[in-house]
Image: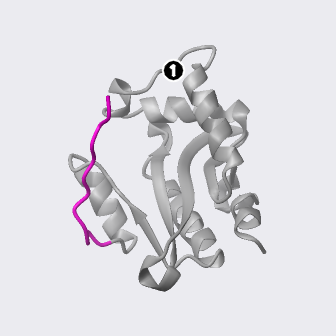
């Protein structure tokens, strides 16, 4: 099965949870998850209609192979999301790595194990697609997120750095 086929399938889990690729119609729910966060409140815009910048980003992502926003859904409601991007590279003998970004769980369902299910799903998809490692960054102020990722086996192996561009 191709990497894109792996990313684009819907998988079903306990408690009526489905993890599937996001559709454009899911953008308001995804943005709401990003806003439902102390840091996201300051950098996202939940508006109706959805700002064009989000639509353009979604279109660019869906046009790029190996790049998908996965959503966790229960009873027709999006309650979690993660962007998964496969990155082919030359280092590590040509290893493809998976990058996880924008991981969010709705505050109303935190603590039920959905984050673990969603991340394990994304990790499994990455392994099935032939990735040799999964990487992510988390804000240094998110100590609870760091503990969560450590419990999944992630190790703080590098120092992440960012440069905001004007």
Q: Is residue 91 magenta?
A: no
Q: Image check: 32 left or right of 162?
A: right
Q: Is residue 165 magenta?
A: yes
Quadrant housing residue 38: top left
Q: Is residue 21 above or below residue 117?
A: above
Quadrant housing residue 92: bottom left
Q: How is the structure coloured here?
A: one colour
Measuring from the top left, give residue 108's x and y in whole percent. Answer: 48, 37
Residue drawn at x 28%, y 59% is 146
Q: Is residue 73 above or below residue 164?
A: below
Measuring from the top left, give residue 16's x and y in whole percent. Answer: 70, 53
Quadrant housing residue 11: bottom right
Residue 42 or residue 2, whichever sits in front = 2
Residue drawn at x 34%, y 70% is 151
Q: Which residue is mark 1?
A: 46
Q: Is residue 29 above or below residue 104?
A: above
The magenta span reads 155-166
Q: Image check: 65 left or right of 29?
A: right
Residue 162 or residue 15, whichever sits in front = 162
* Quadrant (top left/top right/bottom left/bottom right) for the C terminus: top left
Q: Image check: 33 left or right of 156?
A: right
Measuring from the top left, give residue 88's x and y in whole percent. Answer: 55, 69
Whether residue 121 appears in this view of the structure is yes
Q: Image check: 7 left or right of 41?
A: right
Measuring from the top left, give residue 5's x and y in whole percent. Answer: 77, 64
């Amino acid at each position: 099965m191709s990497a894109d086929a792996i990313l684009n399938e819907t998988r079903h889990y306990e408690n009526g949870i489905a993890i599937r690729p996001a559709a454009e119609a899911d953008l308001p729910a995804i943005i709401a998850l990003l806003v439902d966060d102390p840091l996201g409140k300051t950098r996202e815009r939940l508006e109706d209609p959805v700002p064009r910048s989000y639509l353009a980003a979604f279109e660019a992502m869906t046009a790029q192979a190996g790049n998908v926003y996965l959503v966790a859904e229960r009873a027709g409601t999006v309650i979690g999301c993660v962007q998964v991007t496969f990155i082919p590279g030359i280092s590590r003998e040509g290893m493809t790595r998976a990058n996880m970004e924008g991981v969010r769980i709705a505050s109303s369902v935190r603590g039920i194990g959905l984050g673990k299910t969603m991340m394990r799903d994304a990790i499994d998809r990455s392994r099935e697609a032939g990735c040799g490692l999964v990487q992510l960054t988390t804000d240094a102020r998110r100590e609870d997120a760091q503990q969560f990722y450590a419990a999944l086996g992630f190790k703080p192996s590098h120092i992440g750095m960012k440069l905001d561009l004007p």
